[in-house]
Amino acid sequence: MSIPLQKHVKNTSRIAFGCMGLGGSWDKNTLTKSQLREAHDAVNTALESGIRFFDHADIYCHGKSESVFGEILMSMPNVREQIVIQSKCGIRLEEGSLVGQYDASADWIQTSVEASLKRLKTDYLDILLIHRPDPLMQVEEVADVFNRLHNEGKVKHFGVSNMHVHQIKYLQYYCDVPLIVNQLEMSLFKYGWVEETLHAGNAPLNTTHWSGGQLEHCAMNDIQIQAWGSLAQGLFSGRDISSESLAVQNTAALVAELAAEYQTTKEAIVLGWLMRHPANVQPVIGTIQPERIKACTEANSVLLSRNHWYKLLVTARGQALP
Ligand SMILES: NC(=O)c1ccc[n+]([C@@H]2O[C@H](COP(=O)([O-])OP(=O)(O)OC[C@H]3O[C@@H](n4cnc5c(N)ncnc54)[C@H](OP(=O)(O)O)[C@@H]3O)[C@@H](O)[C@H]2O)c1
């Protein structure tokens, strides 16, 4: 079966909004009025700033992130068709006798998608990702449930998250539907994705578990790479870093210097560094503060020079290239 890729799914917005912070907290308490208002303000600001791609997962804030987003959608008629909603399943949180685990069984994928649709108050997900590799995953079973969800109209496209190249290749071998996304931890702090490409014949500097050939495989197979943790949780854009390493402190200082030089925000430099790479990385931003959301979207108009891109890399790694 081949699924024609809707153009808008991939070109909706260069930056994706990560919804993990929308549900208030990781407990089962009802959202307070101020948490609800905060979520509304964040989503409104994202939309006003041109963001049209929203990243969810069934587990975020125990489902509250999807629920509050569903409420927001109901209050904005016509928005659903203009945005891409991506969600993930496959992580099960500890509950009663259930140990925290990964679950990519067909039953759980189907159950989880149906619960996400209910919470999001929508008939379909634009994209569904398997959140993490499950060692017990049966690939034929995943292929079947992907087909079923697609045929039922519940999911338009499929992808993965935190998978090595060989794991995507293996799953794709069995799936009829194309896997169109891999979402991975990538930033100026977690720079193993660049490090891996630099080390022909040299020992890598850090131990990030980045599989060789990921960028190339994704480019050659039209798989969108998305970067979670893309703001490095604010390490280089204003968070207190007094107890962080010298490399982090020097990088934060360089980010501030470049923000002044490019007349932009620090967030735009941090994200602009990811976006300058030809791998066409789509950063997923996790801030829910309106001012920071706007500051992030400034990255759309920043093009770092080659020299500045390398200067940021060398400063972040704390030593010259091999
Ligand atoms: N696939 C996966 O396994 C996976 C894992 C984790 C996350 N994700 C997705 O990726 C998105 C982003 O991930 P993330 O939240 O880990 O990364 P992030 O975007 O790097 O960091 C966002 C966090 O950093 C805080 N922050 C940002 N700038 C700050 C500053 N200057 N000072 C203080 N705090 C600051 C934000 O708080 P404020 O809201 O207060 O700004 C927020 O808590 C999530 O929403 C989720 O959609 C996916």
Image (cartoon, grey):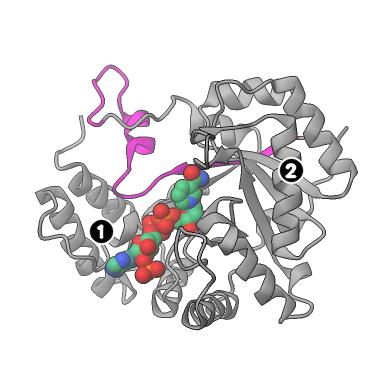
**Coordinates of residue 42 in the picture (x, y in percent):** 51, 76
Crowding near the residue tagged with mark 1, few <14, some 14–19, many ≥20 C-alpha atoms within 10 Å:
some
Mark 1 vs mark 2, CA separation in Å:
37 Å
Q: Nearer the viewer, residue 166 or 130?
A: 130
Amino acid at dot 1: Leu
In the rendered structure, find residue 111 and report the number of the disc placed on it: 2
Quadrant in which residue 137 is drawn: top right
- Residue 187 colored in magenta in the image: yes
Mark 2 Cβ inside 8 Å of ligand 1: no
Amino acid at dot 2: Thr
Report the magenta residues as a range.
Answer: 178-206
Q: Pick out the residue farthest to the top.
A: 201
Q: Is residue 299 above or below residue 185?
A: below
Crowding near the residue tagged with mark 2, few <14, some 14–19, many ≥20 C-alpha atoms within 10 Å:
few
Query: In the image, 262: left or right of 97?
Result: left
Q: Closer to the N terminus: mark 1 or mark 2?
A: 2
Quadrant in which residue 146 is drawn: top right
**Coordinates of residue 252 in the picture (x, y in percent):** 20, 60
In the rendered structure, find residue 171 and report the number of the disc placed on it: none
Q: Quadrant of ligand 1?
A: bottom left
Q: Is residue 220 visible?
A: yes
Q: Quadrant of the C terminus?
A: top left
Query: In the image, 74: left or right of 246?
Result: right
